[in-house]
Image (spheres, rainbow, N blue to C red):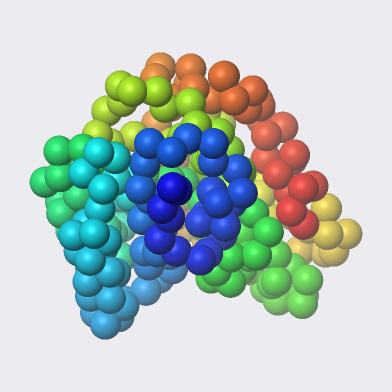
């Protein structure tokens, strides 16, 4: 029986699209990268420890972490520190898998995600402040299910599930305005960088199996699908 903890964007997609039954998936973590509440962080830890205690020892636990852990500008972020703390808990379990995800896009989900925040701001003619040189990576929520379905039996304990193309935030906001048929109010400030690596050959090969678009038009397909 498929066991998925959570009721958000990722868990709903997994429940609809997963075909493998080899994993137990914890998808109930703190998803707002601006979160600073110790209460929320402790809630996730308590729920995760209960999840681990109740696990089927014959199945691998999957935990979704964040690729922003690699962002040098966020090393002091309470959210990133919390995610690293969780990763250390997961790594103590022999049969476990950490999937560091970029910005996940789909229908609904947390209103505080970058995509949802930008979309609502553009719809309501609100100014968006962005760093001139900031880049971000995106993935369609449904592609996560396909990736897990094709993991097989051998995989590293930590996987960075990122797309080969990362995008300048100003370009993303401009594209969203185009697809929403709205003028975008952008305030550009100095800062930002492209800290995002390329996917490993292991990740790239599974993406190819899933027939994921590896070109720059990947983001256009996602925006047209979910805007």
Left of 114 or right of it: where is 3? left
Q: Is residue 190 above or below residue 36?
A: above
Instruction: Examine the rendered structure and indicate whether residue 70 appears above or below residue 22.
Output: below
Is 172 placed above or below 37 here?
Answer: above
Q: How many discs appear? A: 0
Question: What is the x, y in percent for residue 196?
Answer: 41, 37
Quadrant position of residue 95? top left
Residue 13 percent location from the top left of the image: 59, 51
Q: Is residue 66 visible?
A: no
Choose between 196 and 211: the one closer to the eye: 211
Q: Residue at x 40, y 70 (%)?
A: 34
Is 56 on the left-hand or right-hand side of 192? left
Query: Going by the image, does 117 lie left or right of 41?
Result: right
Classify 87 as above or below 149: below
Q: Residue at x 60, y 43 (%)?
A: 17
Residue at the (40%, 23%) spot, across then down: 152
Q: Residue at x 18, y 60 (%)?
A: 53
Horizontal and vertical percent for residue 160?
A: 37, 36
Q: Position of residue 112 (x, y in %)?
A: 53, 70
Camera sees residue 52: yes
Left or right: 126 in relation to 168? right
User: Looking at the image, which residue sits at the far right?
Assistant: 181
Judging depth in this view, the residue of 169 and 88 nearest the camera is 88
Given the current orientation, which residue lies at the most extreme left position?
92
> Which of the 4 image quadrants contains residue 86?
bottom left
| Quadrant into which the C terminus falls | bottom right
């Amino acid at each position: 029986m498929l066991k998925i903890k959570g009721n958000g964007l990722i868990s709903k997609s997994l429940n609809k699209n997963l075909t493998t039954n080899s994993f137990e998936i914890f998808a109930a973590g703190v998803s707002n990268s601006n979160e600073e509440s110790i209460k929320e962080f402790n809630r996730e830890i308590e729920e995760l420890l209960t999840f681990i205690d109740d696990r089927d020892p014959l199945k691998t636990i999957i935990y979704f972490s964040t690729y922003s852990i690699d962002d040098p500008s966020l090393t002091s972020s309470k959210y990133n520190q919390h995610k690293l703390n969780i990763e250390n808990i997961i790594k103590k379990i022999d049969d476990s898998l950490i999937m560091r995800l970029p910005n996940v896009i789909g229908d609904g989900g947390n209103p505080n995600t970058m995509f949802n925040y930008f979309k609502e701001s553009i719809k309501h003619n609100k100014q968006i402040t962005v760093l001139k040189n900031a880049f971000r990576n995106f993935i369609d929520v449904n592609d996560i299910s396909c990736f897990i379905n094709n993991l097989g039996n051998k995989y590293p304990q930590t996987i960075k599930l990122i797309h080969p193309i990362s995008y300048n935030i100003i370009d993303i906001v401009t594209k969203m305005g185009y697809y929403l048929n709205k003028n975008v109010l952008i305030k550009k400030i100095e800062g930002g960088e492209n800290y995002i690596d390329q996917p490993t050959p292991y990740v790239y090969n599974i993406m190819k199996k899933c027939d994921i678009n590896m070109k720059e038009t990947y983001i256009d397909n996602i925006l047209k699908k979910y805007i």
